[in-house]
Image (cartoon, grey):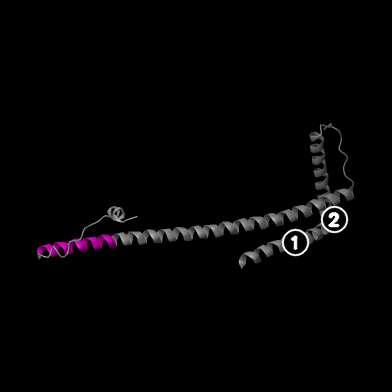
Amino acid sequence: MVLPVLKLGTLALKTLSKPVAAKLKQQAAIHPRFRQFIISMAQANHRITTRMQRRIYSHATDAEIRPLNEEKAVQDAVDLIGEIFIFTVGGAAVIFEVQRSANKEAKKEEIRIQELEELRQRDESLAREVELLRQKLEELEQLAKSRGLSGIFSFKHATTEDSKLAKPA
């Protein structure tokens, strides 16, 4: 029940991040101080990508790079901000899912270890009980021999390997 609701919540978060990113882009373009910051960020991004493209296509890298006009710089910057916001929300959702899955697996492993420990303790307890019964049987045989009843209690001690071999297949 929790898994479908959690997946649905993650999907809703990703879907709602797109309108939030659009609103963020709109507000970023209006605020004067932030506008100057994003224009300089867009110009730097333009210079870096233009240099990379020139190197990739073996063009002259020492040529002057013309800056973007102000509106184009603002539009590029707000688009970048929106994409970064959506990517961040998606990345956080993926990290949350991975962390939740890892916690679930750790709990399962802890339960398996606990079950194995319980089985080991049960096995040790049964081994002690078998040994105790074996000792009591030997005492009973000794008591029977001392009273002259050795023919009545003639048990054969068989090890587990001998009993496995004696059973027909």
In the displayed structure, does residue 134 sit left or right of residue 114?
left
Percent position (x, y) of residue 51? 81, 37
Majority secondary structure of magenta residues: helix
Question: Tag on residue 15?
Answer: 1
Q: Residue at x 73, y 60 (%)?
A: 14
Q: Is residue 35 magenta?
A: no
In terms of image quadrants, where is residue 7? bottom right
Which residue is labeled 2 in the image? 29
Amino acid identity at mark 1: Thr
Between marks 1 and 2, how big is the CA–CA gap? 23 Å
Q: Residue at x 42, y 58 (%)?
A: 116
Dot 1: within a 10 Å radius of its alpha carbon, few (fewer than 14), some, or many (20 or more) residues? some
- Residue range of the region highlighted in magenta in the rendering: 129-146
Judge whether 57 appears above or below 135 on screen. above
Local SS, label 1: helix
Q: Could you say which is closer to the camera, residue 117 or residue 139?
A: 139
Q: Could you say which is closer to the camera, residue 70 or residue 144?
A: 144
Percent position (x, y) of residue 164? 31, 54
Percent position (x, y) of residue 11? 71, 61
Q: Quadrant of the C terminus?
A: bottom left
Dot 2: within a 10 Å radius of its alpha carbon, few (fewer than 14), some, or many (20 or more) residues? some
Local SS, label 2: helix
